[in-house]
Amino acid sequence: MLRHTMHRLLPLILVAASLASTGCVRRTIRITSEPPGALVWLNHREVGRTPVEVEFTHYGTYDLLLKKNGFEPLIGAMPTGYSVHGTPGIDLALEVLPVHTHDLVEWHIDMVPRDNNHAALLDRAAALRAEAGGHNPEAMAAAGNAPEADATTPQAD
């Protein structure tokens, strides 16, 4: 009788033990900056100041925003890359098997000091406009190609 009961309980004990010792896949993004101490938002959620580590669930592209007084804010899309641990099927097996893995994605941002010089800002804007193929109002006026006033717009007397 005892032997028969043990044969029935043994599979249950093995299943319970395997569930108690399931694996874990830990995914972390480490964000650092130069200089340190920049405030970080990831997908529009404030996560702390650099250096900071944030856990993530899915591989893909995340919206990143860094701000620090005296420096230009950084706004952009940052990819986590891809890991074999994120492959459907393998990710499930790693969660069930008694295996612990840690995927670490590292992003380092060199922040640019803010330039408050108004003339330099206008020069950079003109250079970007020219690079993008836009028009330069000052050059057009100097060449006599200033846009003509719209006939429907009232003119000041």
Image (cartoon, helix red, strand yellow):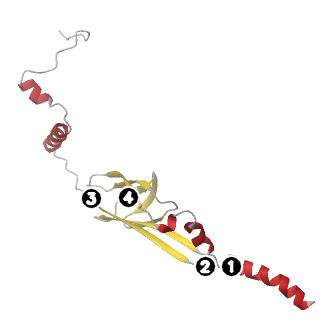
Label 3 Cα crowd, 10 Å radius (few <14 / some 14-19 / many 20+): some
Say which label, 2 or 4, has the lower sequence index. Answer: 4
Label 4, label 3: how far apart the Cα atoms are: 12 Å
Residue 135 vertical position relative to residue 45 in the rendered view, above or below = above
Marks 4 and 1: which is nearer the front? Answer: 1
Report helix, strand or loop for mark 4: strand
Q: Are marks 2 and 4 in contact (CB under 8 Å)?
A: no
| Amino acid identity at mark 1 | Ser
Q: Name the residue under label 3.
A: 111
Q: Where residue 36 sits: x, y (%)? A: 31, 65
Q: Do the residues labelled 1 and 2 touch (CB within 8 Å)?
A: yes
- Along the line of sight, the residue nearer the viewer: 104 or 66: 104
Q: Do the residues labelled 4 and 3 touch (CB within 8 Å)?
A: no
Label 2 Cα crowd, 10 Å radius (few <14 / some 14-19 / many 20+): some
Q: Name the residue under label 1.
A: 18
Residue visible at 43% across and 70% down in the picture: 104
Residue 19 vertical position relative to residue 34 in the rendered view, above or below = below
| Amino acid identity at mark 2 | Pro
Say which label, 3 or 1, has the lower sequence index. Answer: 1
Label 3, label 1: how far apart the Cα atoms are: 48 Å
Say which label, 1 or 2, has the lower sequence index. Answer: 1
Tag on residue 39? Answer: 4
Residue visible at 22% across and 56% down in the picture: 113
| Amino acid identity at mark 3 | Met
